[in-house]
Image: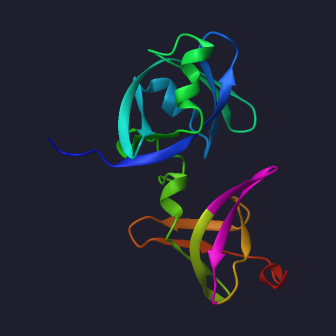
Amino acid sequence: MRSKSLVELGKIVKAHGLKGDLSVQLLFEAEQTIEELESVYLDMNGKQIPFFIEFFNPTPNKRAILRLEDCQSLQETAKYIGKTIFIPEEELLEDDLDVSLHQLIGFTLVDKTLGTVGTVLELMEMPGQYMLKLKAGNLEPLVPFNDTFILRIDKEGKRIEADLPEGLLDL
């Protein structure tokens, strides 16, 4: 049996209510993806174990309320707190740019004026927008990830083409 490539979706941060619901902090917008899944994988002692989803309710600030099929009480939630949630990579829905956010890690950011700026280390959510954290020599600048600055994403070439405002990288 072929092993599935799993992508980290988020982490269970606490119980929610008394009926076995779990509060989840998501790494990226994934509400629609989860609503369509039948199961998720939890990291249980270093192994990713599948769990069926009973329901998923997205809430603001990249959080969600999740109920697993076999988790029906507050007492049962304790073993899931702090566990990392994974989903199969092929289950991720592609966004309008035809690339999922997690796939940007390792891409090279190329500015139309400056040329190669650096490599994406992390995609961070800040109030109102995402930021790309880059490795650029000894620096780790943050670049807004939005339609204003990002011109094109070349998935095959693992490049992000940008038009950064003058002085942005000097901050």
Membership of 127 in magenta stretch = yes
> Mainly helix, strand or loop, the magenta region?
strand
In the depicted structure, whether residue 121 falls above or below residue 140: above
Which segment is the magenta one? 123-137
43 and 171: which one is in front? 43
Q: Quadrant of the N terminus?
A: top left
Question: Residue 24's x, y, as percent?
Answer: 63, 33
96 and 64: which one is in front? 64
The colour style of the image is rainbow
Question: Residue 171's x, y, as percent?
Answer: 85, 80
In the depicted structure, whether residue 143 falls above or below residue 54: below
Membership of 110 in magenta stretch = no
Quarter residue 41 falls in = top left
Q: Relative to residue 85, is residue 142 drawn left or right?
A: right
Question: Residue 78's x, y, as percent?
Answer: 58, 26
- Identified at 56% across, 37% down, the residue is 30
- Identified at 59% across, 16% down, the residue is 75
Quarter residue 64 falls in = top right
Question: Residue 60's x, y, as percent?
Answer: 75, 32
In the depicted structure, whether residue 113 falls above or below residue 143: below
Q: Relative to residue 55, is residue 132 drawn left or right?
A: right
47 and 140: which one is in front? 47
Extreme residue in the left direction: 1
144 and 52: which one is in front? 52
How many numbered discs, if any? 0
Q: Relative to residue 55, is residue 24 drawn left or right?
A: right
